[in-house]
Image (cartoon, rainbow, N blue to C red):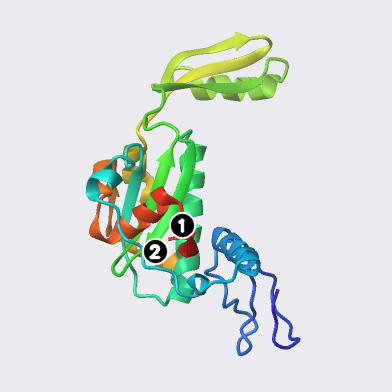
Amino acid sequence: MIKLREVPSPPFNDPLVFIDPVDPSRNVASAVSEEKLEIFKRACKEYLEKPSEKFFFPKAVKPLPDDEIEKHLEGFVGIEIEKPDVIPDNLYPQAKKSLRRIIKSCEENDFEIEDGRFVVTEKKIYIILKPKEMEIEETYIHRGPPAKEKKHVEAFLKKWKGSKDVVKGPYLKDGRWYVEVKRRFTRLNEFLAENLKKISLGKDIEKVVKEGKFAILTSKDLLRDDLRIFWTEYIEKKMPWER
């Protein structure tokens, strides 16, 4: 934590904390992600080893050709959200929170996310997800209570017996009750289209989403003018001073 003067301030969970000297309740470094902080640390280390102006004046990113970017887009799902009129200090923490909540909701519904990023452009916010699988099994096994817990067993059987979502069971196996249940969603894009409005996002971003100002993007939709720089950096994985 960095403070220019010793004043009371609330606890922060951000990777880098720099207390606003005018408003001690505000972290002016809240937009700095853990990833960017690690890049900064690496840049400091490499600069001390081999000083160069490239650390301060890196070359601009030269976008890769479209056909090269297209090779890497398979397996991604995106969300395009209209950018709310909010200052960057407030917008970036909201985008970070939104990404975190969306990933959490996906994984609670068995869509494992291998990578997730957000990109803020002039007019849009993009949430970009890389699921382990684009489509998951149509059913899943729901584990119930042990057979000896009579009260919980009764509640379990009452809930699942005769349910239209049940494919198999309820059945007893190795002293515990189980039921095989049909999923409502097996494709991630369909799950997001139906449930994005129900997820708790950053305040201003959530308002835009609830107004319906968003779109779910398949991999073929993700090659856009305002994402070319992002994809180039994502694919090349070069540090700014290495360009």
Which residue appears at 41% of the width and 31% of the height? Answer: 133
For residue 163, above or below residue 78? above
Point out residue 197 in the picture as x, y percentages from the top left corner.
37, 52
- Residue 211 lies left or right of residue 203; in this view the side is left
Foreground residue among 230 and 3: 230
Residue tagged 2: 205
> Residue 189 appears in which quarter of the rendering?
top left
Residue type pointed to by label 1 = Ser
Say whether residue 38 is left or right of residue 60.
right
Q: Nearer the viewer, residue 75 or 61?
A: 61
User: In the rendering, at what x and y percent does residue 35 appear?
Assistant: 56, 58
The residue to which callout 1 is attached is: 98
Does the CB distance between marks 1 and 2 fall below 8 Å? yes
Q: How far apart are marks 1 and 2 (CA)?
A: 8 Å
Q: What element carries label 1?
A: helix
Give the x, y percent position of residue 160.
50, 21
28 relative position to 82: left or right: right
